[in-house]
Amino acid sequence: MRVAARMSTIGTESAFEVSARARALEAEGRSIIHLQIGEPDFDTPANVRAAAKAALDAGATHYPPFAGIPPLREAIAADASARKGFAVEPGQVFVTVGGKGVMLYAILGLVDPGDDVLVPDPGYPIYESLTRFVGANPIPIPIRMANDFRLDVDELASLVTPRTRVLILNSPANPTGGVLTRSDLERIAELANRHDLWVLADEIYGRILYDGAEHVSIASLPGMAERTIVLDGFSKTFAMTGWRMGYAIVPPVLAKTYGQLIINTISGVATFAQVGAVEALVGQQDDVDAMVVEFKTRRDLIVDGLNAIPGIECRRPVGAFYVFPSVAGTGLSGAELTERLLVESGVCVLAGSAFGHHGDDHIRISYANSQANLTEALTRIRALVEPLVATRV
Ligand SMILES: Cc1ncc(COP(=O)(O)O)c(C=O)c1O
C-alpha cells in the first residue's frame, strides 16, 4: 500500500507539531510557556458567540449557499469597501474554511505545474508547501531585518520571469510583523501590472497595527482589483481561530473558479458560524480595539525585554502579534536555540528556519500571551542565553 507520489512534495506548519511536543512535555509535569501559537489568547467576543448560539436554536443547521450566506457576503463587502479602499460587491466574496482555504483555492485555481510563485522568505510556510504540492516552484523573496522586514522591490523585480504566475504578499506579516508601506505597494503594483501577475494579498492581520501604521490593500491601487485575491478572515481580528472562517475577495473573473473549488471541497462553511461572523463585522468593535491596545503593550514588553538580553536583537514591528529577533549573537542558530529553550527552559518558540532559509538566525515569538507569562519567558530566556554569550567573549 502506498500514498500518492505528490505527498512527497507537501510541507507542514511547524506550529502544530511543536505544540504537540510541548503538550507532551507538560503531560510529564514540565512547566511550558507557549509562545509558538499564532492565535489571540482572548475569547471570541460575547456578542458573536451569542449570535451563533441563537442561530443554532433558530435552525441554522442546514447547508449554506456554497459561497456564503447572503448577509455575510454583504457584510464582508461593506466592511472591505470601507476599510480596504476599493469597491467590493457581495458577488466577489467567498466564505472559506479559514484564511487557509483562500490560499488553497488561489494556488489550485491559478497555478500550473512548472509555474513560478513568488513567496516571502521568511513567510507563512503554507504558501511554499501548497506551491510545491501542485508541482510549481516557490521562488523565495528575501525579507530582511535590516529593511524592517519589508521586501526590497528592486530585488523582487529581479525575480520575475516569464514563468512567474502569482506573487504572494503578506502585510502585516507572519512571522516578522513587518508592514509594507504605501510606496512599497505602489511600486509592487506597477510591477504586477507590467508583468501581468496575479497577486494573493494575505491581509489576515490587517487590523492588528500599531503606532499609527496604515493598512493599504494592494487591491485598492490602480489596475490591481482585477488581478488581486484578497485573503482575510475572522481568526485573528476577532479571536475566532477555532471557528475556521476566512474569506476571499476575488476579481469577478475568478468567481466561477472559487465557486467550483468550494463545491468540490467543502460545500460551504458552517451556517450558524456564518451568522456569528455577521455579528463580528456589524456589531460593536470595542473588543477588537481593546485587544489591539493590549497587544501593543505586550509588544513593547517583549521587544524591550529581548533587546536587554545580550546576543539578541529585536526590531519593534508595527503589525501582527509576532517578533522575529535575530539570535546570531548567541552563537546558536535559531533552530538550536529553539530546541534548548523548549527542553532546558520550558519556553516554546518557533525556529525562524521554519519560515524559510532567510530566517535561519532568528526565532519567532508570538506575544499573544499574558504579560505575566511574557515576563516569565523573558527571565527564562535570559537565564539560558546570558551564560552562552558570556562564554563567547
Ligand atoms: C499569514 C497567515 N495567513 C493565513 C493564516 C491562516 O488563517 P486561518 O487560521 O484563518 O486559516 C495564518 C494563520 O496563522 C497566517 O498567519
Image: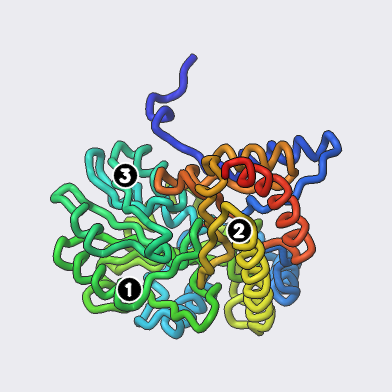
Does the image show residue 276? no
Q: Which residue is mark 3?
A: 138
| First of labels 2, 1 by sequence position | 1
- Residue 89 appears in the picture as rendered: yes
Say which of 145 and 249 sits in front. 145
The residue under label 1 is 219
Whole-percent x and y of residue 147? 37, 64
Q: Identify the mark nearer the N-term, 3 or 1.
A: 3
Circles 2 and 1: CB atoms closer than 8 Å: no
Circle 3 Cα neighbour tier, 10 Å, few/some/many (<14 / 14–19 / ≥20):
many
Q: Position of residue 10 (x, y in %)?
A: 43, 35
**Few, some or many C-alpha atoms within 10 Å of disc 2 (few <14, some 14-19, many ≥20)?**
many
Residue 18's quadrant in the figure? top right
Asked if residue 208 is positioned above or below residue 258 in the image, the reply reads: below
Q: Nearer the viewer, residue 141 or 57?
A: 141
The amino acid type, in three-letter code, at marker 1 is: Ala
Please name the residue shown 18% across and 68% down the image. 193
What residue lies at 21% left-to-right and 65% top-to-bottom?
Answer: 192
- In the rendered image, residue 121, in percent from the top left (x then y), is placed at 39, 51
Real-space CA distance between mark 2 and mark 3, rounded to the nearest whole angstrom: 32 Å
